[in-house]
């Protein structure tokens, strides 16, 4: 669920049609930084969710209380349990839907803060710059190496901007990951407390207790839920990235790449 897992991009048309990085002269003065940008609700929400997720990690009671408010069983029917709890009769289905909801929301947040065109440009420029930099270092000419420093500084700044933007999306992922995993565990524990047989599921023809450990202290439900969420994360992020790039191509009238002839 990191930025590196999204390369290469799904559509190369907009990326390959993008202009090369402007050659900024070292002597050219940079514009003054913007001041007083004002309050941004989206930034406040992302920071708040990140801090809330940190609090949930530290305080187990608070984490369970927040997840429990979503509903954990027939005796505590919160809105999420009412929607996908199915009276604790289909725990695997509940886990699958919860994982899909979690990954869909985090993918939307990640896509909202990520400029895919800028991220791809920086990736391409970094690859090209490394080749030029290695050639300059092999030449042993100090003036040639020094001439690349302004471009290295600019590339470092652009890379930092992309990384910081993607970290904002991680705040939503961080919060929902803790919340939904805790909620799933509470739902299964509540079902087990009502009747231990309720926490048993059929996997490949054999009955497995979801609370039984599979590797060390890791229970079966944690492993199964992770197998739901990890591939869904890749699918949703790739799908939203394709939609974003297609919209960019339409809005900027990017011509399609020429079809290679054999």
Image (spheres, rainbow, N blue to C red):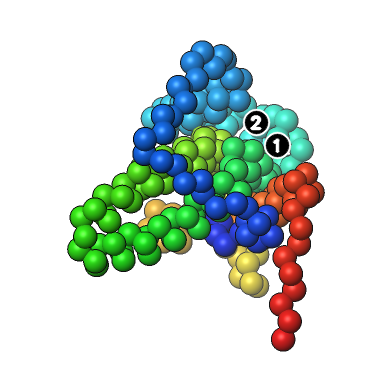
Q: Which mark is residue 247?
A: none
Residue 232's quadrant in the figure? bottom right
Q: Residue at x 50, y 58 (%)?
A: 124
Q: Is residue 210 above or below residue 166?
A: below
Q: Position of residue 147 (x, y in %)?
A: 31, 50
Determine whether, in the image, residue 164 is placed left or right of residue 194. left
Q: Position of residue 18 (x, y in %)?
A: 62, 53
Q: Is residue 31 above or below residue 196?
A: above
- Which residue is outermost to the bottom? 262
Q: Which mark is residue 70?
A: 2
Determine whether, in the image, residue 27 is placed left or right of residue 244. left
Marks 1/2: CA distance?
6 Å
Residue at the disc numbered 1: 81
Q: Position of residue 68 (x, y in %)?
A: 59, 30
Q: Nearer the viewer, residue 144 or 109?
A: 144
Q: Residue at x 50, y 26 (%)?
A: 47
Residue 203's quadrant in the figure? bottom right
Q: Position of residue 149 (x, y in %)?
A: 31, 47
Q: Is disc 1 placed on a helix, strand or loop?
A: helix
Q: Is residue 181 above or below residue 120?
A: above
Residue 9's quadrant in the figure? bottom right
Quadrant in the picture for the C terminus: bottom right
Q: Residue at x 48, y 30 (%)?
A: 50
Determine whether, in the image, residue 203 is placed left or right of residue 143. right
Mark positioned earlier in the residue sequence (1 or 2)? 2
Q: Nearer the viewer, residue 145 or 129?
A: 145
Q: Is residue 57 above or below residue 213?
A: above
**Are discs 1 and 2 less than 8 Å apart at CB?**
yes
């Amino acid at each position: 669920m990191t930025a590196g897992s999204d390369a290469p991009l799904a559509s190369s048309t907009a990326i390959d049609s993008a202009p090369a990085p402007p050659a900024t002269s070292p002597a050219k003065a940079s514009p003054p930084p913007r001041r007083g940008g004002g309050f941004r609700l989206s930034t406040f929400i992302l920071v708040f969710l990140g801090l809330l997720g940190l609090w949930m990690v530290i305080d187990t009671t608070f984490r369970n209380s927040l997840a429990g408010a979503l509903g954990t069983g027939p005796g505590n029917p919160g809105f999420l349990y009412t929607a996908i709890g199915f009276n604790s009769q289909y725990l695997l289905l509940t886990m699958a839907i919860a994982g899909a909801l979690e990954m869909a929301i985090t993918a939307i947040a990640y896509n909202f803060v990520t400029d895919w065109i800028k991220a791809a440009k920086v990736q391409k420029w970094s690859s090209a710059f490394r080749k030029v930099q290695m050639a300059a270092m092999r030449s042993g000419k100090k003036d040639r190496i020094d001439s690349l420093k302004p471009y290295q500084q600019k590339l470092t700044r652009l890379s930092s901007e992309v990384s910081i933007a993607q970290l904002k999306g991680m705040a939503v992922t961080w919060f929902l990951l803790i919340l939904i995993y805790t909620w799933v565990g509470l739902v299964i524990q509540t079902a087990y407390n009502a009747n231990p047989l309720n926490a048993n599921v059929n996997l490949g023809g054999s009955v497995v207790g979801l609370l039984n450990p599979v590797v060390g202290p890791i229970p079966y439900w944690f492993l199964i839920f992770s197998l739901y969420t990890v591939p869904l994360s890749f699918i949703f992020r790739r799908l939203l990235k394709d939609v974003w790039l297609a919209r960019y191509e339409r809005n900027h009238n990017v011509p399609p790449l020429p079809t290679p002839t054999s």
